Image: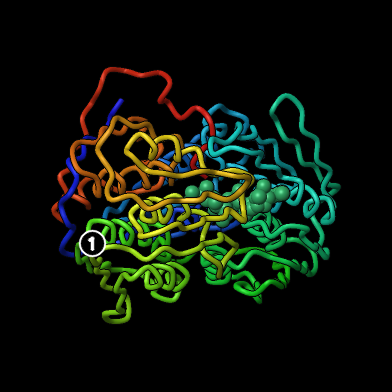
Amino acid sequence: MSKYIIRGGVPLNGSVTISGAKNAAVAIIPAALLVDGVCRIENVPDISDVSMLFGILRQMGARLRDLGGGTVELDCTSVSTHAATFDAMRRIRASYYLIGALLARFGRADIAMPGGCNFGGVRPIDQHVKGFTAMGASIDIKNGVLTATTDGGLHGASVFFDVVSVGATINIMLAATTADGVTLIENAAREPHIVDLANFLNYMGADIRGAGTNVIRIYGVKSLHGGTYSIIPDQIEAGTYMAAAAGTGGRVEIKNVTPKHLECISGKLREMGVSVEESGVASIVVEGGERFRKIDVTTMPYPGFPTDMQPQISTLLCLADGTSTVTEGVWDNRFKYVDELAKMGASIRVTGRTAIIEGVSGLTGAPLRAHDLRAGAALVIAGLCARGTTEIEGVSYIERGYEDIVGKLRSLGADITSIDDTFDASEAPAEASAV
Ligand code: EPZ
């Protein structure tokens, strides 16, 4: 298994191009199951979560052609099974989008459920089940397999979510696209990837209105046709490079971004004293200063500060003057990485859902282990900012969601290499930790 070796203290400089959004890609790829014909999808990120999903669809009979440069042609017309109960399904959280997609297509879905998660707490699916049930499905979960059945297909329904859930919003949108009648989702998630999925489906002939607000109306259509669609840039990958640029005191132009999607991150970085400027329609320039100012952050569903940037901003706040607080408002617990940062000299105390971070004068390189995707990205940032050498194990988690992170950082001047270490069975991501 690989590990990263980082010699820190080098300011990042230059420009980096952001890839397509992971969390949009993992929704749009299963959505192709609803389409009669070929979907040409552009700006597909080259990350392991996406290759795992492609592998699952291929196993079900889909045809995939890689045209290079992030463009693929995906044709699910010949998929004839409603069952996806093989092992690969358990390795990726987003495989549960196949429930909505297969229910829409066949009126039935048998799905191997993803395992537990790695950033602590539970990841329930009660809101997904509530939505499917309202639309006429019966759900049964036994021995890790979820079976969803209908009596002749789904019908439109009103669904009110008790918590704002990205996954449940996406799953119900998928299920409702070709259902009989109108579906109303209230208290829907508003993340950019929700809008991207709605745009993809609408391009292919769906009638979905209101995505990006908390009320989404889906007018069921008979069928969808093929077409071409380009996935939006990854908000969190961009935010991660913004944090890395700021933390190392460098100056980086971040290209292929949607600045509006980054406002929640830019705002907090500016509060810390970081310069963030738009430079054209699809790029921003981030420049770090001497020391950061302390801030308080609470993660919230979009347009709030994203939970998927929580470990990265906490890492920067280790280098701020004074005491900052970071409160996790989405997940029960997402602070496992704190023990790793402590090995580098960080001073963080976690009480309940809040991390209290006392700024220190600097971090020192140490051997570390990534326990999930964003925690892993935060450790990379910490290593880049630290004095000395940092070794990070568990990098397969990072590569689930960051395309060529080592190559991109090296192009900005970072001293980071990926080396093949001896096999370490504990590193294999057998459970769904990334999505
Ligand atoms: C999505 O996960 C993302 N994954 C996560 O990205 C992200 O952290 C999360 O949304 C929040 O933004 C993908 O898009 C593939 P949720 P999801 O349903 O959909 C509770 C990353 O690093 N909840 O919005 O699984 C849940 O426990 C990751 O890229 C219920 O109570 O998250 C949590 O507290 C990891 N019942 C909150 O809602 C449900 O039925 C938000 O979860 C569903 C969720």
Q: Is mark 1 within 8 Å of ligand 1?
A: no
Residue 270 or residue 191, whichever sits in front: 270
Image height check: is 420 above or below 32?
A: above
Q: How is the image coloured?
A: rainbow
Q: Residues within 10 Å of mark 1 (few under 14, many from 20)?
A: some
Q: Quadrant of residue 112?
A: top right
- Residue in front for this viewpoint, 374 or 361: 361
Residue 428 x, y percent position in the rendering:
42, 25
Residue 371 in view in this figure? yes
In the image, taking residue 185 as reference, residue 138 lies left or right, namely: right
Drawn side of residue 410 relative to residue 190, left or right = left
Is residue 105 in view from this perspective? no
Q: Amino acid at mark 1?
A: Val
180 up-or-down from 149: above or below: below
**Front-most of residues 100 and 266:** 266
| Quadrant in the picture for residue 391 | top left
Q: How many marks?
A: 1
Residue at 80%, 40% in the rendered image:
139
Residue 314 point in image, percent of width and height: 43, 52
According to the image, label 1 marks what residue? Answer: 16
Quarter of the N terminus within the rendering: top left
Q: Is residue 323 left or right of residue 174?
A: left
Q: Residue at x 66, y 56 (%)?
A: 165
Q: Locate residue 128 relative to residue 297 in the image: left or right.
A: right
Q: Position of residue 251 (x, y in %)?
A: 20, 66
Residue at 45% from the left image edge and 39% from the top image edge = 337
Q: Is disc 1 placed on a helix, strand or loop?
A: strand
Quadrant of residue 18 within the rendered picture: bottom left
Q: Position of residue 17 (x, y in %)?
A: 26, 62
Q: Residue furthest bottom?
A: 280
